[in-house]
Amino acid sequence: MRCMIVYTSVHHNNTEKIARAMAGPLGAEVVRAAEAEPEAVASADLVGFGSGIYFSNHHKTLLAFAESLPVRQGGKAFVFSTSGRGGTGFHRKLNGILAEKGYAIVGEFACKGWDTYSVFKLIGGLNKGRPDGDDLERAAAFAGGLAGS
Ligand SMILES: Cc1cc2nc3c(=O)[nH]c(=O)nc-3n(C[C@H](O)[C@H](O)[C@H](O)COP(=O)(O)O)c2cc1C
């Protein structure tokens, strides 16, 4: 099974840490959305898409990359994020684009990430130290659970 993880991580590399923790159990190739080739991604058996959350959605470069994919009926994908608030509620837009491209979403993962946007930087940011070791373990376990997908 050929797995790829496509990500954008620009604020504190929070999501990149999660992407790399997930890559091990899946034997996945990890690529930045800005450098990924749509055709190579479309031919993978399982693709993970993740970024930090920006104004309630995944980063625009990841959304644009998903929009650039060819339609691939029968493709499998998982979606992940880090954010100030945490939770998979921010995944709706990316999930919708991937569904239009023919992907079945086989799993979702979210955790909190260090956030120094705007006034939060005055107090050292929210969620300092996140993702932490527990988050990375949970991410690896999540990916391990998808290995047979
Ligand atoms: C410009 C900006 C907008 C953000 N918007 C949100 C948001 O709407 N909701 C939220 O929970 N976190 C928000 N965050 C926090 C980021 O999602 C969080 O820090 C994330 O872990 C960053 O991931 P990255 O380091 O991989 O880019 C925002 C951060 C920035 C810098």
Image: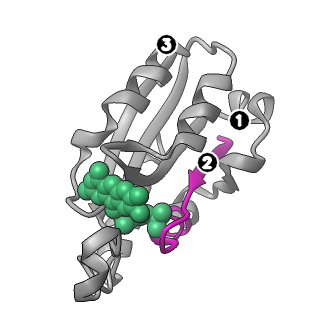
Q: What segment is highlighted magenta in the picture?
A: 1-21
Question: Taking the image as drawn, is residue 63 in sight?
Answer: yes
Residue identifier under label 1: 41
Q: Mark 1 and mark 3 in contact (Cβ < 8 Å)?
A: no
Q: Mark 2 and mark 1 in contact (Cβ < 8 Å)?
A: yes
Q: For the point 58% across and 11% down, which residue is it?
A: 73
| Alpha carbon separation for disc pair 3 and 2 | 18 Å
In terms of image quadrants, where is residue 3? top right
Residue identifier under label 2: 6
Residue identifier under label 3: 100
SS under mark 1: helix
| Residue 117 on the magenta segment | no
Nearest to N terminus: mark 3 or mark 2? 2
Q: Nearer the viewer, mark 3 or mark 1?
A: 3
Residue 59 point in image, percent of width and height:
49, 46
In terms of image quadrants, where is residue 20? bottom right
- Determine the quadrant in which ligand 1 lies: bottom left
Q: For the point 75% across and 31% down, which residue is it?
A: 38
Residue 137 point in image, percent of width and height:
35, 74
Q: Is residue 56 above or below residue 94?
A: below
Q: Is residue 50 left or right of residue 86?
A: right
Q: Is residue 31 left or right of residue 93?
A: right
